[in-house]
Amino acid sequence: MFDRDITFSMRLIMLLALVGLMPVAGIAAGNESGNNFRQVKKELVKVYANDRTTFYGGCRYDASGHVDAHSCGYSARKNEKRGNKIEWEHIVPAWALGHALQCWQNKVCTNSHGKAYKGRKCCGDSNATFRAMESDMHNLVPAIGELNGDRSNFRYGMISGEARNYGAVDFEVDFKQKVAEPSPHIRGDIARTYFYMELMYGLNIGKKQKRLLAVWNREDPVDARELERNRKIMAVQGNSNPFVTSFTADADAVINPPE
């Protein structure tokens, strides 16, 4: 990214090592599996084989990805067909990872028919760094298809009121403000994923957003399920999320950006 971001990332890495949140060896090694997004989705099916519940709402789904709406009280807001199956949701949206790249902005790719194209597909086809980010399993979770679509590339945040547009599923979307509010018990998971993506790939998180994520990290600590997921992903991808493996609420002092 930019020199300032690199400087902060290096400072963060050093601080993490100093306070024992990350081993010095192998620092800041993100997804080096070489798998693309299509391949990773198959691996994720295996990771979640013994815990088939959606990230938003905890709805059960079967081996074919069909959602059991009765298990969580889910009802479709608008798109019932898409709500019947899970999709693999990027906690940090693919747009946030790639929209500033040339392959996303300009038609630098050409298909077999000679037609030029750009955007996510072009970046996935031509940019190794984007491909690693897009297919990083630490940033992917099973979500009801409709919720994945409604969240789009919106940021996470707090929304006034508790409108239940998806039945009993605790998930709100403000389409006007482009904000999605997750349930309290997964907010820490989201925060630690954002911090991971920042550390590994230089993701730029605004100060206001980072302050909110630091609160979520503290209020929703790592649980056994998150640790097990991290362990399984490490076995496949080769790296762990250090904000999960060495969680401490005091990490706020390290996570918060310097003034």
Image (tube, rainbow, N blue to C red):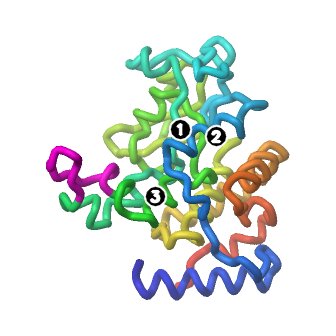
Please tell me which residue is depicted at 49% across the width and 34% down the height of the picture: 172
Foreground mark, 1 or 3, reads 3
The amino acid marked with disc number 3 is Arg
Residue on which the image places disc 1: 88
Q: Is residue 48 above or below residue 232?
A: above
Asked if marks 3 and 2 touch (Cβ < 8 Å), the reply is no
Query: Residue 53: horizontal and vertical position, in percent?
Result: 69, 29
Quarter occupied by residue 252: bottom right
| Left or right relative to 55: residue 248 | right
> Would residue 94 appear left or right of 188 to someone viewing this image?
left
The mark found on residue 131 in the picture is: 3
Instruction: Report the residue at 15% width, 48% height from top.
Output: 115
Horizontal side of 201 relative to 12 (left or right) equals left
| Residue 240 placement: quadrant | bottom right
Considering only vertical position in the picture, is 127 above or below 190?
below
Q: Name the residue under label 2.
A: 44
Asked which secondary structure carries label 1, the reply is strand
Q: Give the range drawn in magenta.
A: 109-122
- State yes or no: discs 2 and 1 in contact (Cβ < 8 Å): yes
